[in-house]
Image (cartoon, grey):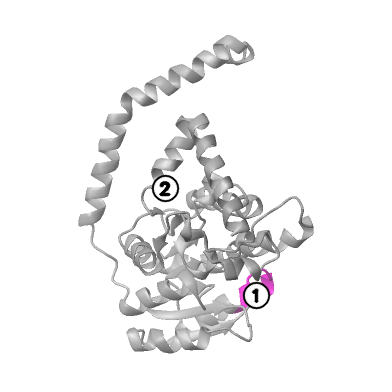
Amino acid sequence: MYEACFNNSFTNELVYYVLLLLLLLISPLLFVWELIVAVRSSFRRSENMSGKVVLITGASSGLGELMAYEYAKRGAYLAIIAIEEPESRLKQVAHTARELGSPDVLFLFADVSKVDECKMFVEETVKHFGQLDHLVCNAGIGPLYSIDIDITKFVPSMDINFWGSVYPTHFAIPHLRKTKGKIIVNASGAGVLNPPKLGVYSASKAALISFYESLRYEVSPTVTIAIVKLGFIKTNFISAKHSNNTTGVRLRRDIDTEIPAMGAEACAKAIVYGVCKGETSITQPRFIKAIFLMKFLFPELYRLYNKYIDSTFDKLRKG
């Protein structure tokens, strides 16, 4: 019965538009449902992080650094991870986190794209603190893709962005089960929206979303997973200087000179607040959720939006 319906081009289209119409008709109820969930979340008791252990990758700068400070203010013990580089600020971040209220900060240099090193820093964290409560998978890179650049130069994007989260997650799960802990993964809104010039980056983040959405059903209810989908955030990640230090397309101006971006401190605060409130999906800035809806409900309008993003990147590249 169903096969015949889908095999016929007319009925196949008809089913699509009927379901779309039904969704639009019940959308007011769905919005009310979302509002109720949001209101209930605001009254939910926030998790007390005092004495709990948080491991954060990619913590030497940007959102990783700022999330470490937010957890420090809440009294959490920290294990912060970053790749060893001459200009690394990881030791300084550890010092600042202690001043902000963390009782103890363990900092370790490691490459998250290497499975043995991920196993090492998870085990060292548990050995040092005796437990693990939150794993924050934040490490990532985002070179701008172009068909004119050797494709093999983008291999590290998948290694770091995808496997650099999956590896530590695999080794952390047994410890998180003991504490009924949480996994927080910075998957990016690009994993849903697939903006121009971010093809490989978007693919790596889409892979993260798929993996963790599937994983949450395997580890629930013992371990909670929070997937973070962000728009453009004012960190060095969206600067022209950062693009010039990558293998991808180089920009002459910062992205936020043309495209709206959220402040990094406000974003880090919103993420940690949401995680401690028990949210399992966090999107910042909030208007990005409307863009998600635009993509799926109004694809032609979304294509116009992406053309605007594409032309904006061309402007940023030309200066």
Residue with the mark numbered 1 = 111
Residue 118: say if magenta.
yes
Image quarter of residue 316: bottom right
The vertical placement of 101 against 35, above or below, is below
- In the figure, is residue 14 to the left or right of 288? right
Report helix, strand or loop for mark 1.
Answer: loop
Of the image marks 2 and 1, the number of the one nearer the N terminus: 1
Residue at (70% x, 64% y) in the render: 156
- The quarter of the picture where residue 51 lies is bottom left
Camera-side mark, 2 or 1: 2
Q: Position of residue 3 (x, y in %)?
A: 61, 15
The correct choice, above or below, for 268 with respect to 279 in the image is below
Residue that protrudes farthest toward the front in the picture: 319
Give the percent coordinates (x, y) of residue 11. 55, 11
Split into 4 quadrants, where in the image is the N terminus? Answer: top right
Residue 205 shown left or right of residue 23 in the figure: right
Q: Which mark is residue 288?
A: 2
Q: Is residue 199 visible?
A: yes
Separation of residues labelled 2 and 1 (CA atoms): 31 Å
The amino acid at mark 1 is Asp
> Number of marks in the image?
2
Q: Residue at horizontal 52%, vertical 56%?
A: 187
Quick one: label 2, few (<14), some, or many (20+) residues within 10 Å? some
Q: Which residues are magenta?
A: 111-120
**Residue 195 seen by the camera:** no
Q: Amino acid at mark 2?
A: Ile
Please state which of residues 285 and 24 is positioned toward the viewer in this rendering.
285
